[in-house]
Amino acid sequence: MTQQVPLIIKLGGALLETEGALTAFIGGIQHFLKQYPRPLVLVHGGGCLVDDLLKALGKTSTKKNGLRVTPFDQIPYVVGALAGTANKQMMAEAIAQGLNPVGLSLADGGLCEVTQLDPELGAVGDCKPKNPALLKALLAQDFLPVISSIGITAQGQLMNVNADQAAIALAELLDADLLMLSDVVGILDANKQLIPELDPAKTEQLIADGVITDGMAVKVKAALQVSAAIQKPIVVASWRDPELLVKLANGEAAGTRLQA
């Protein structure tokens, strides 16, 4: 990781439902920033919160090719869970640990251009980088942007964007380093062993063999595309290690390194 450029960290929503995990991870961020000050942006999903809310409302939730199908009558609930509950929980923990967060969505300041991805998916958006001005201004003043994966189309339609793809678009927007964190140590092979490095050819083979599937396939393919665009590796790792950021900054190997 390069200290002079922004670092975008994408956090999986399971972090919010694992007891003590958010507190430990935000503490790790604070420790990291004290040793390695640099512009930092958090991008998050919150699929588990969406699932819990829809279940409580008696509504079903399905996925297609690793992406959540979001009927238009469900988008208000998805927005509430992601841009509301998940975003403010992360902000609350950051505030409690002395950081200075600003809660945002992909629509704020025109950060991303969002269009409907596929009519069969409903209110699910495709996300492309648009205007970095707001983020650059916030980072210049040492704020910590905390960005939910909710977008709005040019026609004013709320859209649920895959959080991995949102983080990738923002990394391209800022020419930033990107760290994608979930509850697994990285990308695993057929024997459930960590794969230290992946390139496009090896990735396609693992997808063809059914080793990388569903949401992970979406994540890996999109990550490799942006790796090619920004000419930087992207790391997929776990948020379970609070010292992960310090280890990576010190040049230690962790997770899976994706390089186009």
Image (cartoon, rainbow, N blue to C red):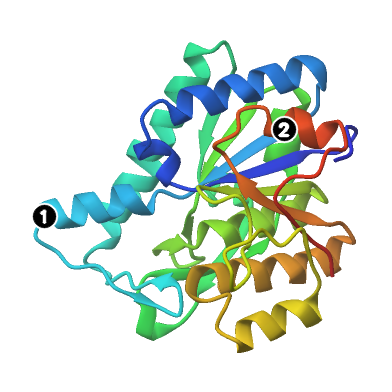
Relative depth, front residue between 135 and 14:
14
User: Residue 47: x and y, percent?
Assistant: 37, 54
**Residue positioned 20% across, 50% down in the render:** 53
**Residue positioned 65% across, 42% down in the render:** 9
Q: For the N terminus, which image quadrant?
A: top right
Residue projecting furthest to the left: 58
**Label of residue 57 in the image:** 1
Give the total number of marks visible in the rendering: 2
User: Residue 77: x and y, percent?
Assistant: 25, 53
**Label of residue 143 in the image:** none
- Tell us which disc is closer to us: 1 or 2: 2
Decide which of tag 1 and tag 2 comes sooner along the chain: 1
From the viewer's perspective, is residue 22 above or below residue 30?
below
Q: In terms of image quadrants, where is residue 7?
A: top right
Label 1 Cα neighbours within 10 Å, binned few <14 / some 14-19 / many ≥20: few
List the residue tagged with mark 2.
245
Relative depth, front residue between 62 and 72:
62
**Residue positioned 77% across, 79% down in the render:** 202
| In-image side of 51 versus 99 (left or right) | left
